[in-house]
Structures are given as C-alpha cells and as structure tokens.
Amino acid sequence: MIYRYQDKYPTISTSAFIADGVTITGDVSIGDESSIWFQTVIRGDVSPTIIGNRVNIQDQSMLHQSPKYPLIIEDDVTVGHQVMLHSCTIRKKALIGMGSIVLDGAEIGEGAFIGAGSLVPPGKKIPAHTLAFGRPAKVIRDLNEEDLVDMARIRREYVEKGQHYKQVINEAEKK
C-alpha cells in the first residue's frame, strides 16, 4: 500500500519493483530499478527517506526517521532481510546484512559490509570498504576481492529479480 501523509506522497520510479504487502508512506523517494521486497515498511512521516537507483530493500525490513534527520540510501546498496534503518546514511555499494540495525546519525561508508545481526549505534561511522560486525558493530577487516565480487553479484541479481517480477506482474495485469 502506498499512502500520502499530510501533503507528502511517495515518489517511486516507474522502473522500481514494489512487492505485494509493502507499505510506503509520506516523504519517500525510490530510484530507478530499485526493488522493495515483501512485507517491508518505509514510513516517511517524520523526515524524508531517499532511496537511490538499483537499491534492494529485502523482505520485512523497516525504514524510518527522527525529526530533522533523513534516511539516505545511495545507489547500488543491498539491505538484507529484516533490517532496521533509522535516520542513517548508507553510502553507495554498501551491504547491510540481514537482521542488522543501523541507528540515527550512523554512516556506513561506500562499499562497506555490515555483517548479519549487527547493531550500528547512533553516530557511528563505518569506513569505506571494510567489514564491520557485532553488537555494537566493530570493524573486523578490510574487504577483499572475493567480498567485492560477491557484493556485486548480489546487487546484480536483485536488480534482475526485481525487473523479472515487475515484468511478470505487468503481463498478468494485461490478461
């Protein structure tokens, strides 16, 4: 379901895939070829949520904000299943592992990888191209070539899956 909140209505690219059961409300923008997967909630009823191009927000994730602190997700980001993002910044090509929580004012650097189940506390900065893991998240190591290749594969596959589902739904609606 897509809802207006006060005078704000979500802006969603026509090439984005929005799965059934997703709720999006208010001041939210979603870029080209992005995919928002089943049972995800994106509430833009406090501050803006800006989602770039080719971003995948996987099943049952929750995105929200605090007053005057937007949630910004740059291009080519992967957000795993059941992730909570709140008024943080996720730089391009980062990956947030499933079940992780990233809180107000935190910044995940370009191409960084947050391991599954991690908690990134308010204001924490995770450097570019590093693996951070734990509760609270701590940098474990720099990413290697194998990590980067796998992250690129995941991004590519989610763009392809989202476009496939979008095509299947469009074809079904024409019948």
Image: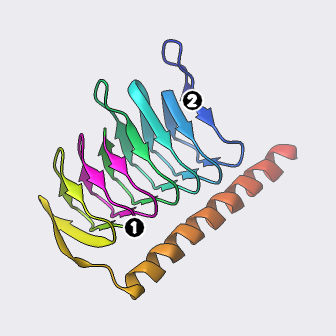
Quarter of the view holding residue 143: bottom left
Span highlighted in magenta in the image: 88-110
Q: Earlier in the sequence, mark 2 or mark 1?
A: 2
Of the residues shown, which amino acid type is indicated by label 1? Answer: Gly
> Residue 78 at x, y = what percent?
45, 61
Q: Residue 80: which disc?
A: none
- Please give left or right for residue 122 compared with residue 94 in the image: left
At horizontal 56% and vertical 65% (from top left) the residue drawn is: 158
Q: Is residue 108 magenta?
A: yes
Q: Residue 111: which disc?
A: 1
Q: Secondary structure at mark 2?
A: loop
Of the residues shown, which amino acid type is indicated by label 2? Answer: Pro
Instruction: Tell me: residue 155, above or below residue 53.
Output: below
Residue that badge 2 annotates: 10
Name the quarter where the N terminus is drawn: top right
> Residue 87 at x, y = what percent?
31, 38
